[in-house]
């Protein structure tokens, strides 16, 4: 879910992304890119863009989870904070290049939209930077948000279509495609709504 604060390591990576991302992201070979105009178009453009988002997400399957990882350039070094980035007491975040849940969605939308959609690296901010979508109207690329009483809006995944979600779940896992997400009791119970990111401007 990260994160309203930055660490020194992630901050350096983010500064590189801010300096270079707009020019490099469309050239990176991690899936098809869109023109910026596509993000602001009608239903056909939304569907085409969403399919590109889902394709970029699918290309990340198998990349490790890294707490704090992921930016406009793709997978990046994570970190550990007081509670996150650990597995069995060992800090994996600071030695793993990968994505956390919001880093994955940030990258996929930025990459697929050629920079027209730039999401914050924070699940709550992504929720508020997007328009609500009814579950019956989901398109590929839409964001699925999950919440618990003890952890409001703790996770975000990308709708891949056909009942599946692509997401980065937690330290020690890989980016994965989860079939039948709404048939899985945990995810069905915690589902807090779907949203569709909005273009800049």
Image (cartoon, grey):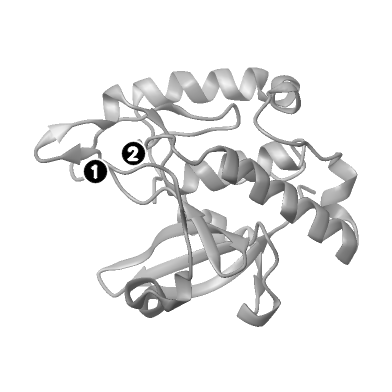
Q: Look at 64% across and 18% down and name the residue there.
A: 19
Residue 96 x/y as whole percent: 32, 26
Corner quadrant of residue 79: top left
Residue 91 x/y as whole percent: 18, 31
Query: Which numbered marker is on residue 67?
Result: 2
Tell which of 42 and 124 is nearer to you: 42
Which numbered disc flags the more N-terminal residue, 2 or 1?
2
Instruction: Decide if residue 61 is in sight here.
Output: yes
Are dots 2 and 1 in contact, CB under 8 Å? yes
Tell which of 170 and 14 is nearer to you: 170
Compared to residue 20, the image places residue 188 above or below, namely below
Question: Dot 2 surroundings within 10 Å: few (below 14), some, or many (20 or more)?
Answer: many
Q: Which residue is mark 1?
A: 84
Corner quadrant of residue 9: top left
Kind of element beneath mark 1 = loop
Instruction: Decide if residue 121 is in sight here.
Output: no
How many angstroms separate mark 2 from mark 1 (CA)? 7 Å
Q: Look at 78% across and 51% down and name the residue there.
A: 49
Using residue 33 as the reference point, say whether residue 134 is left or right of it. left
Residue 53 x/y as whole percent: 68, 48
């Amino acid at each position: 879910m990260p994160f309203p604060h930055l660490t020194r390591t992630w901050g350096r990576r983010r500064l590189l992304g801010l300096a270079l991302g707009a020019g490099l992201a469309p050239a990176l070979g991690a899936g098809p890119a869109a023109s910026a105009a596509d993000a602001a178009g009608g239903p056909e453009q939304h569907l085409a863009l969403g399919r590109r988002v889902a394709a970029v997400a699918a290309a990340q399957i198998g990349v490790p989870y890294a707490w704090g990882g992921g930016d406009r350039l793709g997978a990046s070094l994570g970190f550990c904070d007081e509670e996150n980035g650990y597995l069995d007491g060992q800090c994996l975040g600071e030695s793993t290049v990968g994505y956390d849940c919001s880093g994955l969605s940030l990258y996929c939308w930025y990459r697929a939209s050629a920079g027209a959609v730039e999401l914050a690296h924070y699940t709550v901010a992504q929720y508020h930077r997007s328009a609500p979508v009814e579950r019956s109207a989901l398109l590929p690329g839409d964001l699925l948000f999950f919440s618990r009483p003890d952890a409001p809006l703790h996770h975000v995944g990308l709708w891949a279509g056909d009942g599946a979600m692509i997401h980065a779940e937690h330290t020690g896992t890989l980016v994965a495609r989860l079939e039948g997400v709404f048939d899985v009791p945990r995810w069905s119970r915690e589902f807090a709504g779907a949203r569709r990111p909005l273009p800049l401007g």
